[in-house]
Amino acid sequence: MKIIRKRFNDEIYCTGLILLAVTLIMFLIPALSPIEDELTWFFLNHAITVGYFLTLWISGRLRRGREGLHPFFLFLLMFLVSAYALNRLFPVFEVSAPWFAVMIILCAVNYFAFAFIRVVPVPVRIVMFFLLGLSLCCFLYMAIYVAPFTALGLLAFFFFGISLHALVPLLFFLYTIRLFRRSNARRRPYKLAFWSGIGITVLIVLVYTILWMMNVVEMGREYRRWSEKVRDTYLPAWLHVAAHITPNPVTGKVLRAEMVYTTADGWERPFFNFGSSLNWNEARKHDPLVMIASTLCGTTMMTDEDRIHILKFLYDSRYEAEERLWSGDDLTTTHVQTSARIWPRLRMAYTEKTVNVKNNRIITERGRWRNNQEAIYIFHLPEGAVVSSLSLWINNKEEKGLLTTKAKADSAYKTIVGVENRDPSVVHWQEGNTVTVRVFPVLDNEERQFKLGITAPLSLEHGALIYRNIYFDGPVTSSTGEDVEISFETPPADLQKGGIFSKEKDGRLTASGPYSADWQLSFKDEGLVHQLFSANGKVFSVTPYRKELATADISDVYLDVNSVWSKNEYNTVLSLLGHKRVWVYIDEMMEQVTEQNRSELFKQAAASRFSLFPFFKISQPSTAIVISKGVVNSPSVDDLENTRFMDALKGWLAGGQHVMLYNLGGELSPYLRTLKECRTFRYDQGDIAALKALLDAHRFPASIENDQRIVIESAGMTINETPGTEVSTAPDHLQRLFAYNHIMHAMGPRLLTGGNESDTLVAEAAESYIVTPLSSLVVLEKQEDYDRFNIKESNNSLKNASLKSKGAVPEPHEWALIVIGLLLIVYLKFRPVLFKRVAAI
């Protein structure tokens, strides 16, 4: 207690504590409320720091024997805060990696705590000395890093002492040694703790550097191997690298080095070192471990473009690599409103996602340019689902989207956003059950709102229907709130709703809280009911999907083996195949399996994290079956563009080839999922026992889709179209689901091979008002914009979907019947009055 009283009776020390708190508050104000006027806050910080230093100097507390060490550390901490405030204006250090930021904060707290070390227990003192050793290493690293600026700092000190900030790490390093010597460092436990802190730091750096070197060497070896024979390969070298590396935090940083993480090669020495040179939506960071490891061991030889390709799928970073017309660095998602209507007996749902996105940048000075930013969202849809509405709020008014061709929508958006800087929004179809929504502009300290409507089938799994949340990748959601409201057309049986939902009296489910991408509902499947939707002389109905088996004369079996296969599965499948020819694809060679090489082939094939099976290498597709297991994090067809592999695949698809594909389990890879969307396969999935039954019976499910019937396998149903007119008892989403899946079926391989757009399919998309590979929804600011790009609203369409949508738009003759019926009602109601008046006359 004597030490504590002594410290707080020291006016200069107490003044330092107060001023340190003030500098911290002033440092945090721009961080918590981003503003342009950061220079003023820095000068305030710097003035307080200089003032306190002059106080220490004039008072004589800096002289030997005047107990000035702990007040001087308060000055150093103020100086450190001032240095980081200056770093915002002249970024010598990029944004610190989270672990390093936490480490600096711990070190700062530890320096403050040393003023009271005599009153804390011995175990706490040991921890403090351990942290002191860590601090010595941290500031030694920082002193070396800023060494090029140290001489400049000394030469230019006369400019208000601003350049002396370059000396802060060196001062901390020197005075940490002095603090250690002055704080009972002769006692063995404290000395051991101090040196342990240094030793542990060195050990961590050494281990990390070794791991870094192993990754760089492994990537370089594989990359060189395939680069040297690029003319003889179907796939680029980076794909072979991606197939054989193990994703881990170190691997990810090796791939992001120079693009995201500062390295010795990529660090520009001048003060003005702004941003990344690549279109990668991730803030640049400073990680001392990356800097040291890359300095000692170098970085991968792969080009930036190749590394981005790997990051896109290996680390699920497609959003970061999305093409941008404007930055979105300061955007955050503030709120998500999820409203859904579920039809359990039609196995479908309609969901509206209303999203608010905010630009957190604040302009405080007049005359500064407003910071227009572009919000991009990637929504992941269930298989067979389709976007059926889009709205954008302009001047606080909801403006609904118009459906047009993808080319027109893209042209209008890029022209207006890239040149005219006005209000548009657009949603485009992408392969792999995703759509991209773009909103522009999101201005400084302003919020934009848009709404996306998705018509989707439910998933039928083991007798239960599953409704899964439709999640997205987009601006930061760490502080996003979400409100959910779900209603049912008919009460579901055995509802499993999870803990986040509460049930209202009318049967609605509601939830409110932080945004969560991963939630679902499940309830018992009570079977499909016969309901119809009628429009434009067509009637749509649903029936259960039942596989129709056809004869399968299989002579060749191709095993699409990768790392998710087990040796037992491989051997079990081989035992089922009897005397059939069996093939495995390894290192771009198709190898036939024999008793002698079966184990070695599996070892080589299973070493690959994912597989890209070359269907164009199948010699007789009609009598061949491919047996596969899916890997979710693997390349998509889009990643394979401009490769010999894709050219050969497109040629094969153009020939109208079909092959049997059996999935042994798990979600299909993006590559196979896209080919399945193109109706490339006769497809089935199940376990090994179900596969054995098919092989023994020499049968396999046939493709039963045609222009009047489409299959939604995940929901276990078919949607049928027949000519005629009926009273609608089902929602218009029935037509939308049919149209989307029919268009995908009709386009087939043309989804990948290209070709002329079918006017019939474009008209079908327009009639059903859905987003497809041929059509997009777009919202523009003015009617003149729609006229300029020849975007017109169709009169004979379902228009944007709505939660209130109940049925069809009446046909012309139905309107006539409705009018006649109304006139009849009016006549019957007023007939007595009319007869009385006639009688009176």
Image: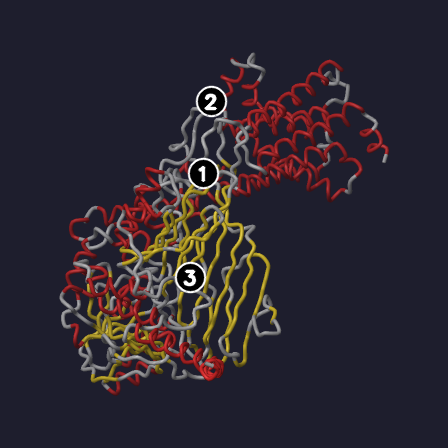
Front residue of this view, candidates 212 and 395: 395
- Reading the image, the residue beneath label 1 is 284
Front residue of this view, candidates 690 and 61: 690
Discs 2, 3 touching: Cβ within 8 Å: no
Q: Position of residue 542 (x, y in %)?
A: 35, 80
Q: Residues within 10 Å of mark 1 (few under 14, many from 20)?
A: many
Q: Position of residue 192 (x, y in %)?
A: 66, 39
Considering only vertical position in the picture, is 502 above or below 165? below
- Reading the image, the residue beneath label 2 is 148
Between circles 1 and 3, the one closer to the viewer is 3
Considering only vertical position in the picture, is 230 above or below 834? above
Q: Position of residue 229 (x, y in %)?
A: 18, 49
- Reading the image, the residue beneath label 3 is 453
Which quadrant holds residue 628? bottom left
User: Alpha-carbon distance for marks 2 and 3?
Assistant: 56 Å
Front residue of this view, candidates 8 and 427: 427
Q: Quadrant of the N terminus?
A: top right
Q: Residues within 10 Å of mark 3 (few under 14, many from 20)?
A: many
Secondary structure of the residue carrying numbered label 2: helix
Mark 2 is on which residue type? Pro
Discs 1, 2 touching: Cβ within 8 Å: no
Mark 3 is on which residue type? Gly
* Mark before the other along the chain sequence, 1 or 3: 1
Mark 1 is on which residue type? Arg
Left or right: 677 in relation to 474: left
